[in-house]
Image (spheres, grey):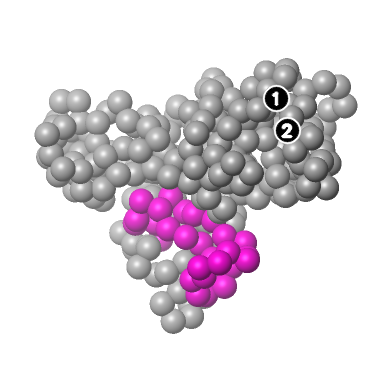
Amino acid sequence: MQIAMPFTILFEEPKPVLEINQKVTQLLFGEAFEITEQEGPFVKGICKTDDYKGWIHQDSLTPQTWLPTHFVDALWAPVFPKAGHKNWAMVSLPFMSRIEIEEEKNDGDYAFIPALRGYVHKSHIKPLTDLNKEQDYVDTALRFLQATYQFGGRTYAGLDCSGLIQLALLRSGYKCPRDSGDQEKALGKEINDAPQRGDLVFLEGHVGIMINETNILNATARSMLVQIEPFNDFIKAYQDQGLEITSIKRI
């Protein structure tokens, strides 16, 4: 099965919640989902991108699976019913959505997505082979500067600290867990010297990424934004909350 909506919410339990007091994430269009059980309209399974387990509504899935050939490289990519920008978009797909392109039906600068029966501009997508380490993951993370914070989010409409890190690393071809605690265990090599560009700074329940030797980028509930701040100010702000650095990891 694959995700058939621009994005959907994966819950820890088979019911939606208004106040998030459980593990939660978003799954993106085209991500593969393996079902293991069903309860009412909800199905439990595992997201094949990062092995994250939980429950989603069955209407979020389609049995019409496709083999992705491309991914969305724009923060949002509008999909039109006809080739050309003077059309209302049927839907917009978030960054890192997986799509199949049927090249025989491409029209000029627009690529055809058979699963949606619509067209996306070629500048908004890249072939899957472009998911490689030649893409600087810090540059990718910086594209989300000033995006709003949303616990459990994985799109420019709202994302959390570990969602930011995961999207940036996935874009560069790295396998990356979803939650910051799992990221701390799985990613990079711990260092004891001064942090540098690209290092991941972990605290209990939080993670940020160094953009240079003195500044850090992080999605934080303190401002409800993705923001850049001096590393020393970042440390002090979390120390005031009783949190200390648990590790600095170098990819």
Q: Is residue 244 above or below residue 43?
A: above
> In this picture, which residue range is highlighted in magenta?
1-28
Figure quadrant of the C terminus? top right
Q: Is residue 21 left or right of residue 45?
A: right
Residue 8 magenta-highlighted = yes
Furthest toward the right, the residue is: 192
In which quarter of the view is residue 134 placed? top right
Q: Position of residue 70 (x, y in %)?
A: 37, 36
Q: Position of residue 115 (x, y in %)?
A: 26, 50
In this rendering, the count of numbered labels is: 2
Residue picked out by circle 1:
230
Gap between marks 2 and 1 measured at Cα: 6 Å
Furthest toward the bottom, the residue is: 40
In depth, the one of 63 and 185 nearer the eye is 185
At x 59%, y 25%, the residue is: 138
Furthest toward the top, the residue is: 213
At x 77%, y 23%, the residue is: 195
- Could you say whether the residue bearing mark 2 is in a helix, strand or loop? helix
- Could you say whether the residue bearing mark 1 is in a helix, strand or loop? strand
In depth, the one of 23 and 29 nearer the eye is 23
Q: Is residue 43 above or below residue 216?
A: below
Residue picked out by circle 2:
234
Q: Position of residue 217 (x, y in %)?
A: 62, 30
The answer to whether the residues at label 2 and label 1 have Cβ atoms under 8 Å apart is yes
Graded by Cα atoms within 10 Å as few (under 14), some (14 to 19) or many (20 or more), the crowding at tag 1 reads some
Q: Position of residue 129 (x, y in %)?
A: 44, 29
Figure quadrant of the N terminus? bottom left
At x 34%, y 44%, the residue is: 93
Q: Is residue 76 left or right of residue 132?
A: left
Q: Is residue 209 above or below residue 184?
A: above
Type of amino acid at the residue the image marks with label 1: Pro
